[in-house]
Image: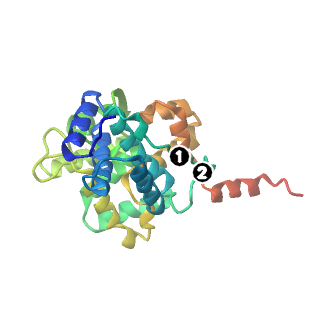
Amino acid sequence: MEQIVVTKNIVVSYLQFLRIQEKSKGTLEKYARELRELEQFLAGKEVRKEDLLLWKENLEKTYSPAGVNGKLVAANGLFAFLGRHDLRMKLLKIQKEIFISEEKELTRAEYSRLVRTAERKGKERLSLLIQTICATGIRVSELQFITLEAVKRGRAEVNCKGKRRVIFLPVRLQKKLKAYAAKNGISKGILFVTRSGRPLHRGNIWAEMKKLCKDAEVNPKKVFPHNLRHLFARIFYSLDKDIAKLADMLGHSNIETTRIYIMESGRVHRQKLERMGLVL
């Protein structure tokens, strides 16, 4: 059986293959990070199953089960690409959670404090960015579709992961974004951009949001762009109770993914049990 060594060139070839398979930019960036870690761990040695199992064991000491599985999926994909299915590792079994951890649940009140704090600090762009994600449920990678033209129409046409969908913008958000564009001399194109005109990077948005936590009195563990999508999902579902429609709005192919987004905390579930009043 052909011996293999995980090198930068091999990883690049695999990522090019994934690009041809039309994997999203986010997926490509994630796989690049995960495989870079594997390359560094193996340090130029021939890939052996026992070393991979040691890598897996080390990952379990540092990352959550979901985080470990994400790295294993990237590695397994590379080995399948290289024709070495024997090197693939079993994913960790993760027990299905019934409730979301209260440490991870961003509440509506906390969201409001983040927005107001950004405004007080003079970070208008960040405030509007947070509101745009939370009011529409879009992904960070989809902010590029929030253009001035889309704002004027009141809807954005999003193309992500091979799926197209229409995102409607609330009237109040439209007014705020129009005013922001006029104030900053934006006459067309993407609204949330860097000084050089390029779309904002996920990492920069994440870092800016984290800086609001102390003054907003919000646990930093709750503050990241994707959690705004979860808040949107929970609030929308509480009003509509239509999980299929919500899945379409979020761009999910699998409703089971949407179920994770609307998972309530144990605290909320406990409150519902108390309100039922069935203990006499």
Q: Is residue 63 visible?
A: no
Q: Is residue 54 left or right of residue 280?
A: left
Residue at disc 2, secondary structure: loop
For disc 1, the neighbor class at 10 Å (few under 14, some 14 to 19, many from 20) is: many
User: Which badge, 2 or 1, comes first in the chain's sequence?
Assistant: 1
Query: Mark 2 = which residue?
Result: 264
Q: How many marks?
A: 2
Front disc: 2 or 1: 2
For disc 2, the neighbor class at 10 Å (few under 14, some 14 to 19, many from 20) is: some
Residue at x 67% of width, y 54% of height = 269
Residue at disc 1, secondary structure: helix
Q: Amino acid at mark 2?
A: Glu
**223 and 114: which is toward the camera:** 223
Query: Mark 1 = which residue?
Result: 234
Q: Amino acid at mark 1?
A: Arg
Residue lying furthest right in this view?
Answer: 280
Q: Is residue 247 left or right of residue 181?
A: right
Residue 142 image-quadrant placement: top left
Residue 183 location in percent, x, y? 16, 52
The C terminus, quarter of image:
bottom right
Residue 85 location in percent, x, y? 40, 34
**72 and 112: which is toward the camera:** 72
Residue lying furthest front in this view?
Answer: 1
- Tell me whether circle 2 and circle 1 mark residues in contact (CB < 8 Å): yes
Image position of 236 with respect to 80: above or below: below
Q: Is residue 11 visible?
A: yes
Residue at x 34% of width, y 67% of height = 212
Residue at x 25% of width, y 28% of height = 20
As measured in the structure, the alpha-carbon distance from the residue carrying label 2 to the one carrying label 1 is 8 Å
